[in-house]
Amino acid sequence: MNAIYPLFSSSKGNAIFIGNSQRGILVDCGVSYKRLDGAMKRCGLDISAVKAVFITHEHGDHIKGLPVLTKRHSLKVYAQDVTLRRLVADNMIHENSQALEMNISAELFDMKVTAFDTPHDAEQSCGYRVDFADGSSCAVCTDLGCVTDAVDSAVLGAGTVLLESNYDEEMMLFGSYPRMLKQRICSERGHLSNDASSDQAFRLVKHGTRNLILGHLSEENNTPELAEKTAVNRLSEFKRDRDYFLMVAKPETTGDMVVI
């Protein structure tokens, strides 16, 4: 049984495990090895189940734990070309592991992993879609200021999608962040608001997505309740727990998972 485990999902650290108790992949590794190991155990998983890591971009909340993880375990680390060069130059991948350029897609055991570009203020940024041999699929789509045609095309039809719902527009407007930081986050190369996320959630459910996970919530400019309420209101023409299932990812897992 394959599942998606949002181990960490916030502006302070991100790591998503996709697979089963025997083997799987990690999308990003933005927390310490100790915290990652603890989160895996809370989900009933051993960290040895991680066989490869797919990096979305070079920001610290997505790569912080990579040097120690790749030192302690012999892994394959995939990233797009610009991101991979940055990781290698900054010694983020230990010589014990392989650094591999993500050329559109990669195949590992029963998974086909495909990268899609996301608009974000990084040197290069992407999301990942995973298609399994049994026909099931999932996607991780965070750190994007807007949903481009390429993003929309990549995630539509995926059975399970972890979708960014970073900030509430009103909380951001009246919040304590400096004006320039607000402009960066709200730009087309920043992060996805609850409203923009819920619009994409509507398209996803309309095209067959059954499981939605809202992730990468700002702890300063959002709340799980607001993100969930915005999505449920936008999806009002569908029946929750019949037409779709919705979960809000915690900053750090307590053992949450969704079967793909």
Image: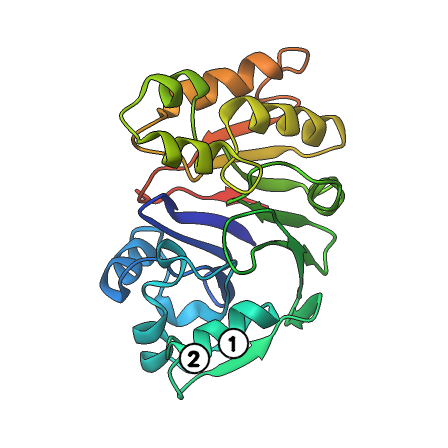
Rendered location of residue 38, percent (x, y): 25, 57
* Amino acid carrying mark 2 in the image: Ala
Residue situated in front as seen by the camera: 108 or 90: 90
Please identify the quadrant where the N terminus is shown.
Answer: bottom right
**Mark 2 in CB contact with mark 1 (< 8 angstroms):** yes
Q: Amino acid at mark 1?
A: Arg
Can you name the residue that lies furthest to the bottom here? 95
Q: Could one spot residue 207 in this view of the protein? A: yes
At mark 1, the secondary structure is helix
Q: How is the image coloured?
A: rainbow
Residue topped by disc 2: 89
Query: Does the rendering let one see residue 77?
Result: no
Alpha carbon distance from label 2 to label 1: 6 Å
Numbered circles on residues, count = 2
* 211 relative to 36, above or below: above
Label 2 element class = helix
Residue for point 63% across, 70% down:
102
Residue 139: horizontal and vertical position, in percent? 61, 48
In this rendering, the answer to whether 82 lies above or below 224 is: below
* Viewer-side residue, 46 vs 66: 66
Pointer 1 residue = 85
Q: Residue furthest left?
A: 34
Quick one: label 2, few (<14), some, or many (20+) residues within 10 Å? few
Report x, y in % for residue 53.
49, 68
